[in-house]
Amino acid sequence: MMIAMAAASAVGKVISAQQEARGLRSKAAFEDFNAGQEKIRGMQDANKIRENLIATLSSNSARYAAAGIDLNSGTPETIDIATQEDADRQLELSRSNATILTEQRRMQAAQYRSSAKTTSDMGWFGLATGIFATAEKADNLYGGSPEVGKTKGVASGASIPGKS
């Protein structure tokens, strides 16, 4: 009975490890998906920044034209350049953030995959050690190899007290 329980425990370790590994692989797939979402979010942010730049420049141009100011010289041109430079900085920051978040997600996914492999390997290692422990228990319980004339614990050629 004890041997059967040890064997069942060893098999249970493998099953448990495989379930945990599947869960980690699932988390890895989800992080891969999230990495794609971060990339898309970064592109959407960049589009919003460009749209805001175009709207701001158009609004400025309309105001200057309504006031009768020459759009290609002086203050209007300086303001437009500053507005474009600000938009460029925002775009660069948005791209950098999207890249960082995407790579963080990919690194997390890789870590989950690595943990899944380790967990799976440890489950199989648990099975192997369980098999050896079960074999050792059986050996101790049933007295080792069934060679004729051998008694457990007595060296070969030694005599047993009371026997000739």
Image (tube, rainbow, N blue to C red):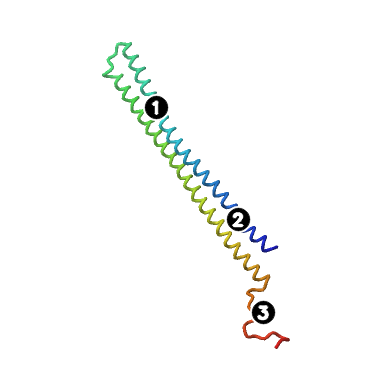
Q: Tell me if mark 2 has few (under 14), some (14-19) or many (20+) residues whose alpha carbon lies within 10 angstroms of its own.
A: many
Q: Residue furthest left?
A: 73
Q: Nearer the viewer, mark 2 or mark 1?
A: 2
Toward which corner of the image does residue 3 lie, by quadrant? bottom right
Q: Residue at x 52, y 50 (%)?
A: 116
Q: Rate crowding at label 1 as few (under 14), some (14 to 19) or many (20 or more) other CA atoms within 10 Å.
A: some
Comes first in the chain, label 1 or label 3 = 1
Of 1 and 98, the residue lying toward us: 1
Q: Which mark is residue 151?
A: 3
What residue appears at the point 49 percent right and 41 percent down from the top-left corner? 31
Q: Report if the CB atoms under discs 2 and 1 are less than 8 Å apart.
A: no
- Residue picked out by circle 1: 49
Q: Secondary structure at mark 1?
A: helix
What residue is shown at x 35% (from left), y 17% (from top)? 60
Instruction: From the image, state whether disc 1 or disc 3 is nearer to you.
Output: 3
Callouts 3 and 2 close, C-beta under 8 Å: no
x then y, percent, for residue 67: 32, 11
Which secondary structure, mark 2?
A: helix
Q: Quadrant of residue 57?
A: top left
Question: Would you name the residue on which mark 2 appears?
Answer: 13
Judge from the rendering whether residue 113 lies leftward or rightward of residue 129; answer left or right: left
List x then y, in percent, for residue 159: 67, 86
Q: Amino acid at mark 3?
A: Thr
